[in-house]
Amino acid sequence: MEWLTAPFEVAFVQRALWAGVLVSAVCALAGTWVVLRGMAFLGDAMSHGLLPGVAVAALLGGNLLLGAAVSAAVMTAGVTVLGRTPRLSQDTGIGLLFVGMLSLGVVIVSRSQSFAVDLTGYLFGDVLAVRESDLLLLVVALLLAAGVATVGHRAFLALAFDERKAGTLGLRPRLAHAVLLGLLALAIVASFHVVGTLLVLGLLIAPPAAALPWARSVGGVMALAAAIGSAATFGGLLLSWHLSTAAGATVSGLAVGFFFLSHLASGLRRRHTARPGPRTVRPLADTAHASALQPTET
């Protein structure tokens, strides 16, 4: 079993594993809502929209995480404002911000005579370079994400399944949407150093999507997604060590592989158990919708 444990005896691989586990938990909290609301394109746009802030921070010798956070805040504000424009569809606004921010980032990089920005690390991540200070920041990000997800749980549920009903219940869907964008931005900023902006959707989308057929509640999806993401991190680092492949890309690719395996197994299970009977299992959407819209006791 030395081949299984030997990589994780090295300090930087241990830090990479912890970073992947923490990022998987943060992405599970945000990615579940992204999957339930069909916001994958928004997640992709926001991840690429980090480039201007990261480029400026790198050129000035500043903190890349801070630069990414500033760009994420700009993207979040832009999506919120454009989403309220009556004659402009949300997808159009997101697409324009996506291209605009990405173009601005490329222009900033091209103005550098030495091309000081490490675009490879930005695009594909460098999980093996995670430091102890990065782990501390990830712990803070996880605590913040857990707090936001807990406080906004009922509003997020109602927003995901019936936005108009959420408004009639006084759950302030516009504010809930803005907070959800902030949660998504937090997950992306926390993840880009581990798997890069091109591959961040692997941990943000694939684990919750893989968990969806097997869980019967939103909380169950989040817990299972965190476990799947952690398993992808462990397996990806193990394969990367023995096969000499890029660690971040291997982790992200394995997460997507788990998604396909999950849905293949789910399809086989449905085919095997598809027989008439008195018992039926309520879909997650129906269960979550009902629990979200039940009036709270006062």
Image (cartoon, grey):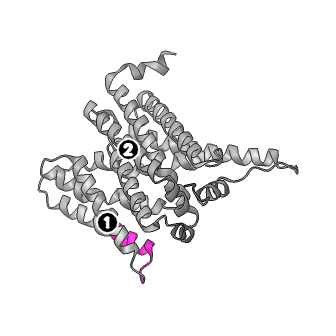
Callout 2, which amino acid? Val
Q: Answer above or below: position of 141 versus 288.
A: above
At x 34% / y 29%, what residue is drawn? Answer: 15
What element does badge 2 sit on?
helix
Q: Is residue 116 visible?
A: no
Residue range (magenta):
87-98
Q: Answer above or below: position of 264 versus 234.
A: below
Q: Is residue 226 visible?
A: yes
At x 44% / y 27%, what residue is drawn? Answer: 242
Q: Answer above or below: position of 51 versus 166.
A: above
Nearer to us in this view, 20 or 34: 34
Q: Whole-Å distance between the Cαs marked 2 and 1?
A: 25 Å
Residue lying furthest bottom: 87
Whole-percent x, y for residue 23 in the image: 40, 41
Label the magenta part by its dominant secondary structure.
helix
Whole-percent x, y for residue 163 in the image: 53, 68
Numbered mark located on residue 77 in the image: 1
Locate the C terminus and report the quarter of the image it occupies: bottom right
The image quarter in which residue 285 lies: bottom right
Residue 266 among magenta residues: no
At x 36% / y 54%, what residue is drawn? Answer: 185
Label 2, on which residue?
195
Whole-percent x, y for residue 170 in the image: 49, 67
At x 50% / y 52%, what residue is drawn? Answer: 153
